[in-house]
Amino acid sequence: MSLRVTTPNETDLVLTRQLGARRELVFRALTTPDLLKRWLGAQGWHLVECDIDLRVGGAWRFMSRGPGGATMGHGGVYREVVAPERLVYTESYDDQWYPGEALVTAVLTEAEVDQSDRTVLTTTLTYPSREVRDAVTRTPMERGVGEGYTRLDRVLRDLTTTEGDTPP
């Protein structure tokens, strides 16, 4: 179950990953601060602040700390919240390592019938231009997201074992 990254058009970057839990639990792991702190980020990075107002018009704000005490802050506003199938929100970084903001659309679909305990997470990031999208693809973003999703799979496995995969 590795991360698949595609660039289907001039401005979009699409990240696709199958995860080992029902979509209700995956949605919860994407939107609950205590759970996000357990998995979000590349190896060596940890989410140290996580504020979420999960409603249309509500803001989110994350601060991560990495190697050597480096910090990375980013946030945005939720435009659409349809539990457990879809999140749409804006995203911009404090240090503006790319100009403007991205529009992020995360869609959770249940895998094939024989694997109903699996969810496919497809995240589309829409950037202001091809140049910005390409600048993002030249960073270690793919590695970092992949490492975070590997950690997410472990968290989901732990939750499924302890909670019986019960939605919130």
Image: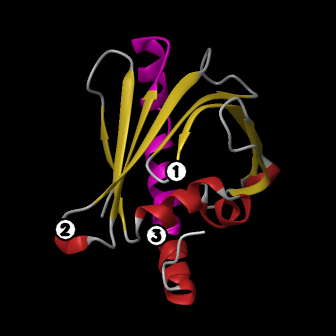
Residue at figure coordinates x 61%, y 56% from the top left: 40
Q: Which residue is mark 1?
A: 83
Q: Is residue 149 above or below residue 132?
A: below
How packed is label 2: few (under 14 Cα within 10 Å), some, or many (20 or more)? Answer: few
Q: Colour scheme used in the picture? A: secondary structure
Mark 1 or mark 3, whichever is nearer to me: 1
**Residue 158, can we see it?**
yes
Q: Which span of residues is magenta-colored?
A: 126-153
Amino acid at pointer 1: Ala
Residue at figure coordinates x 50%, y 12% from the top left: 128
Q: Which residue is mark 2?
A: 113
Q: Secondary structure at mark 2?
A: helix
Q: CA distance from mark 2 to mark 1?
A: 20 Å
Amino acid at pointer 2: Val
Q: Which residue is mark 3?
A: 153
Comparing 27 with 124, the one in front is 27
Quadrant hosting residue 71: top right
* Image coords of residue 72 (percent x, y): 74, 40
Quadrant hosting residue 138: top left
Residue at figure coordinates x 66%, y 67% from the top left: 38
Q: Is residue 139 above or below residue 49?
A: above
Principal SS element in the magenta part? helix
Comparing 68 with 21, the one in front is 21
* Image coords of residue 140 (percent x, y): 49, 42
* Image coords of residue 19 (percent x, y): 38, 64
Comparing 3 with 55, the one in front is 55
How packed is label 3: few (under 14 Cα within 10 Å), some, or many (20 or more)? Answer: some
Amino acid at pointer 3: Asp
Q: Quadrant of the N terminus?
A: bottom left
State left or right for residue 48 relative to residue 29: right
Q: Is residue 5 above or below residue 150?
A: above
